[in-house]
């Protein structure tokens, strides 16, 4: 059962316009580091809706677009920020991509809609939900609802990455530093609550995982190939490449224990931090005559909101004890976050009210996967601003899913921001 306000908003929602906006926005190539064109589209859309868009950028080509609606009540009225990210996976230089994308890999699904079902990475991650909260703002405006508090809407670069690691240093190579963290510090707003609008299958979580990237460097000595002794055992081998297998085996054995030991549960989420070896470097393939005296593994380690990267490094050092000369360095670090339980309660209450009004269902806690990855609500929770991630179906969303998400976002904004006194019947 939906209520009168939801039916009023639903009557104003043009499904064909929503479909068109999703397809237009998501069809714009916007890989990490190249978000400009998608940002320009959002800027034009916000301007058409009267959201007074403005740009905010650490790097000119990678700007946030921030719009606003409401602010007609007293200063005590609550403010809400909804944000999604413009960047999508991909965008790698072909010379880089050949070292992580295997030959014959299936091409990325195109952005499309067939029989009401959407495909394409950009739709799910994350411009489909972005289109929904922009449409939600449009519905509130068309309904003539004057929000008491301000409803901020932001399209952000740099949520996915990259991380400035080993030869890719600098702001231009950064992702999250020019993304939500920059918006928080320089965005000119201090919202009471924040929603990272991303797919969660209509459930919610108030926590998220960060991560640390560790570089495990193994050291040895270069040996001229004609002098190389092939009978040497792998353990303590002078060429560190030969010791990689032992290091990998130890990390592989440790990873499940790490997941169990660092599982973090609250009333509104379960974080299960994961471990994966994602890259390897060592030697010079065009100068092999002396082998190599250095090689390295790059290990991504998930971090819950309460994990300390220093403690994780010490834990790894114990696991790696005895592998021979080595160094373990944290080369990138993003802390997870969790909302204060009392402080986030009003936001969760608003979303729950919206869920009952729009879906006729109680709000549920999201699957652990959504609390075990990076999302931009981490930035706000770490700053003491209660934040959650909440949105439509993540895999194969339908037009009906996006209609529902639009109404949920609109109702949530109204619940949080309130309605100016002149609008109250």
Image (cartoon, rainbow, N blue to C red):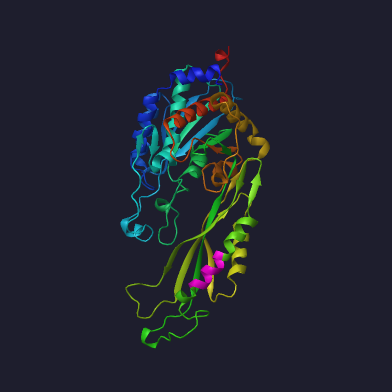
Q: Is residue 111 magenta?
A: no
> Left or right: where does residue 417 sit relative to residue 83?
right
Residue 345 is situated, as x and y percent measured from the top left of the image, at: 65, 33
Q: Is residue 245 magenta?
A: yes
List the single residue furthest toward the right: 342
Residue 355 is situated, as x and y percent measured from the top left of the image, at: 57, 28
> What span is colored magenta in the figure?
244-252
> Left or right: where does residue 88 sit relative to residue 358?
left
Residue 34 is situated, as x and y percent measured from the top left of the image, at: 35, 45
Tell how many labels: 0
The quadrant of the picture occupied by the N terminus is: top right
Say whether residue 188 is visible: no
Name which quarter of the figure residue 312 lies in. bottom right
Say whether residue 249 is visible: yes
Viewer-side residue, 315 vs 116: 116
Residue 424 is situated, as x and y percent measured from the top left of the image, at: 58, 14
Name which quarter of the figure residue 262 lies in. bottom right
Q: Is residue 264 above or below residue 21?
A: below
Q: Main secondary structure of the magenta part?
A: helix
List the single residue furthest toward the top: 425
What residue is shown at x 35% (from left), y 29% (from top)? 20
Viewer-side residue, 20 vs 138: 20
The quadrant of the picture occupied by the C terminus is: top right
């Amino acid at each position: 059962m939906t209520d009168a306000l939801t039916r009023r908003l639903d009557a104003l929602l043009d499904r064909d316009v929503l479909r068109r906006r999703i397809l237009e926005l998501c069809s714009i190539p916007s890989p990490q580091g190249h978000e400009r064109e998608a940002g320009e589209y959002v800027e034009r859309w916000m301007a058409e809706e009267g959201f007074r868009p403005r740009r905010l950028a650490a790097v000119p080509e990678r700007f946030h677009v921030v719009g606003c609606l409401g602010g007609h009540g007293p200063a005590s009225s609550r403010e809400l920020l909804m944000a999604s990210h413009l960047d999508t996976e991909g965008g790698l230089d072909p010379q880089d991509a050949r070292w992580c994308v295997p030959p014959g890999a299936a091409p990325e699904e195109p952005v499309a809609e067939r029989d009401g079902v959407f495909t394409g990475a950009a739709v799910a991650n994350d411009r489909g939900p972005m289109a929904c909260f922009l449409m939600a703002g449009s519905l509130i405006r068309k309904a003539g609802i004057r929000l008491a508090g301000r409803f901020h809407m932001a399209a952000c670069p740099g949520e996915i990455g990259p991380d400035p690691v080993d030869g890719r240093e600098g702001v231009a190579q950064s992702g999250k530093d020019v993304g939500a963290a920059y918006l928080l510090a320089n965005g000119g707003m201090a919202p009471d609550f924040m929603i990272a609008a991303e797919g969660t299958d209509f459930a919610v979580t108030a926590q998220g995982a960060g991560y640390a990237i560790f570089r495990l460097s193994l050291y040895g000595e270069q040996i001229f190939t004609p002098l190389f002794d092939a009978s040497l055992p792998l353990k303590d081998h002078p060429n560190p490449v030969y010791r990689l297998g032992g290091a990998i085996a130890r990390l592989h054995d440790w990873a499940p224990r790490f997941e169990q030991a660092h599982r973090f549960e609250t009333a509104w989420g379960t974080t299960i931090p994961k471990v994966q070896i994602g890259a390897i470097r060592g030697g010079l393939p065009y100068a092999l005559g002396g082998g190599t005296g250095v090689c390295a593994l790059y290990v991504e380690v998930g971090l819950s909101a309460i994990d300390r990267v220093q403690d994780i490094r010490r834990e790894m050092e114990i696991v790696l004890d005895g592998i021979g000369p080595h160094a373990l360095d944290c080369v990138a670090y993003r802390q997870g976050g969790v909302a204060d339980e009392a402080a986030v309660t009003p936001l969760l209450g608003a979303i729950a009210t919206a869920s009952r009004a729009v879906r006729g269902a109680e709000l549920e806690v999201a699957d652990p996967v959504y609390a075990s990855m990076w999302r931009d609500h981490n930035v706000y929770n770490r700053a003491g601003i209660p934040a959650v991630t909440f949105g439509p179906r993540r895999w194969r969303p339908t037009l009906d899913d996006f209609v529902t998400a639009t109404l949920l976002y609109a109702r949530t904004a109204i619940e949080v921001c309130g309605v100016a006194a002149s609008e109250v019947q």
